[in-house]
Image (cartoon, rainbow, N blue to C red):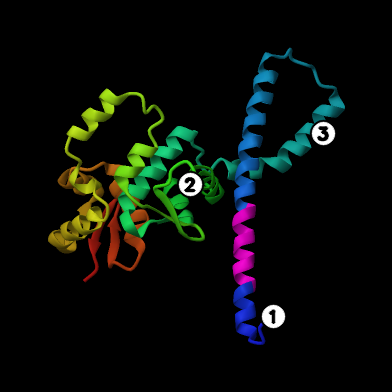
Amino acid sequence: MKSNNPRIERLKEMLSLEERRESLEQELGELSEQLTALKSQISGGLSSAPAVVAAPSAVKGRASSGAATAAPAKAAGRRRTFGSGLLKDKVMNALTAAGAEGVHVKELAAALNTKPVNIHSWFHSNIKRNPAIKKLTGGHYRLEDASTSAASTSSKPTRKAKSQKAEVKAPAEGSRRGALKSQILSELASAGNEGITVRELADKLGTKYKNVYIWFSTTGKKGLGVEKIGKATYRLAA
């Protein structure tokens, strides 16, 4: 039944468009992966094929088309692409560092210098495999439980000896969900106006440099009073 309130109708339309946009982005991500696979197969076939001498008219046509496509090629090269295993590690590290607040796809893509559609596609294909990853709203995800995630993402569960050794080892202080935020803010408060570098923070907290860097690129931008004063150097605003 259609509502008489125009505001409610607009909200419904916005939600419908948002769901459609996410679906299209996910489809684009899958198409992008298929195109990448096909391009690699084609390039592999061309490298093994004999060279063909082009006719003069064909050479002119290629020169003109090459000039037209040079700019898009450069623009495409600005974004980084990751292998499935490398992207998985970076996304999982970001989720662990963000804790209960989670990460937004656009912010994570900007921090990793990759396309948002790649991150959307990764979440779409991995959220069913890993029940610890929870979708909060459109483009917003978090890790429900770090320990559950570590167990569910193991690709070879039969190696019990290694997993038992990992359980015996005490987890790093910054690996507990939500602990990284309070620890970073505490160190920033202690550093005062001079601030502190990401490397110094990572050393003090006993965690990985990239976890702290991703935290500043995502959670640290959410109205916590954190400001950047230099290269990889931050402080709390007065």
Q: Which residues are magenta?
A: 13-24
Q: Give neighbour class at mark 1: few <14, some 14-19, many 20+ (Cα, 10 Å).
A: few
User: Residue under circle 1?
Assistant: 2
User: Residue under circle 3?
Assistant: 61
Q: Does the magenta portion include 176?
A: no
First in sequence: mark 3 vs mark 1: 1
What secondary structure is found at the residue carrying circle 1? loop
Q: Nearer the viewer, mark 3 or mark 1?
A: 1
- Which quadrant is home to the C terminus? bottom left
From this viewpoint, which residue is outermost toward the bottom? 4
- Against 162, residue 215 (above or below) is below
Q: Give neighbour class at mark 3: few <14, some 14-19, many 20+ (Cα, 10 Å).
A: few
Measure the C-alpha gap from mark 3 to mark 1. 57 Å
User: Residue under circle 2?
Assistant: 127
Q: Nearer the viewer, mark 2 or mark 3?
A: 2
Q: Where does residue 237 sit, x and y in percent of width and height? A: 24, 68
Dot 2 amino acid type: Ile
- Against 193, residue 115 (above or below) is above
Quarter of the view holding residue 100 = bottom left
First in sequence: mark 1 vs mark 2: 1
